[in-house]
Each structure stands twice: as C-alpha cells, then as structure tokens.
Image (cartoon, grey):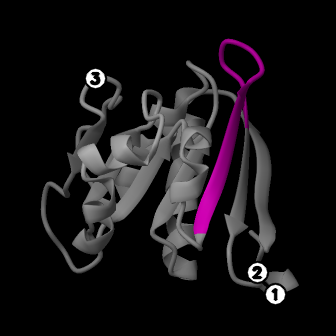
Amino acid sequence: MKKLLFDEVTHSTDETEALGARIAELARREGIDFAALYGDLGTGKTALTRGIASVYAPGAYVRSPTFAIVNEYTAAGRNETSLPVFHFDMYRVTDEDSLDSIGFYDYFARGGFIVTEWSENIPWALPEEYIEVKLERLSDDERRITAVAVGRERKDDETC
C-alpha cells in the first residue's frame, strides 16, 4: 500500500533541508524508521538527509556517504527524542553479499533512523514500511520532491 505524503518543489538547499525535517516528523508520527531516497547526482539527497538528521540527531555534521558507504550521526546533546541516523550510499551495492559485507542488516537492530541513497539498487532489502522519497532536479536551485509512505494501509486523512 502506498500513500502520497507530498509532492513539492523546493527553491533552495534550505527548503530541501526543511522538507527533510518534515519527512522525519512524518516518519516519527507514523512509527517509520527508514527513508529510501531515489535521485540522480546533485538532486539534494544529502541536503534532505541533513534535514532528517536535524530532527533525530540535532547538531550532527551531515556529509555524503559516497566514500564511506555509511555515515552515522548522533545528537550533539542526547535527549529523549534523539536517535542515531545511519546514512547509506548504495550506489556501488550490487547484490545481497555487498549488503552483508557492510553490515547493513545489523543497523536495523540498533534503534536508529536509516536513510539510503540510491535505493533503486536494493529493492529486495527495503523494509515492509518506509518512506519513499524521489528527488528530481528541475534547475540549479529547484528540486521536485515526492514522498510516499509505503507499507500498512493508512486512512485518507493521514496526509500532510
């Protein structure tokens, strides 16, 4: 079951980050702990993740996981609402063995929020419930961002 959360155009990195924070709030409200990002290079995936991390791990320095494969972000000051954010780059992942070698499935048991870039490379590994986020570059500054809740059935009035 898929439920459209929003389809919006951002006009700056700040707006993309703000939309990421909105995604984190929606995920928290729905009890979802996974965001699967889809988009080409330069579409704002890391900026969106910065927004997500601002909710779960305030004060964390967010950077692209391109060379590290996974970055872990924790709140500068721990509180009852903070969670670690695990930010994966799946660009080079080609099969189940690749995921096993980076310990991907171990992160599910760590009680954090998982963000995957290049999620189209791991369709078999996505959880039953997640937020699917598609980013499209419209111009140097503009991005179309569509977010869909995937998983259990949701009421019509649960959109944002």
What is the x, y in percent for residue 99?
A: 36, 47
Nearer the viewer's eye, disc 3 or disc 2?
3
Q: Is residue 22 left or right of residue 149?
A: left
Instruction: Work out whether residue 160 or residue 122 is closer to the camera in this orientation and state it.
Output: 122
| Residue drawn at x 35%, y 25% as measured from the top left | 66
Contact? badges 1 and 3 (CB < 8 Å)? no
Disc 3 marks a residue whose amino acid type is: Phe
Looking at marks 3 and 2 on the same chain, the residue that comes earlier in the sequence is marked by 3
Q: What residue range appears in magenta? A: 130-144
Q: Is residue 114 left or right of residue 67?
A: right
Q: Which residue is mark 1?
A: 155
| Residue drawn at x 26%, y 69% as measured from the top left | 82
Q: Is residue 27 left or right of residue 143?
A: left
Q: Which residue is mark 3?
A: 67
Using the numbered discs, state the Cα–Cα distance from disc 1 to disc 2 in whole angstroms: 6 Å
For the N terminus, the quadrant is bottom right
Residue 158: which disc? 2
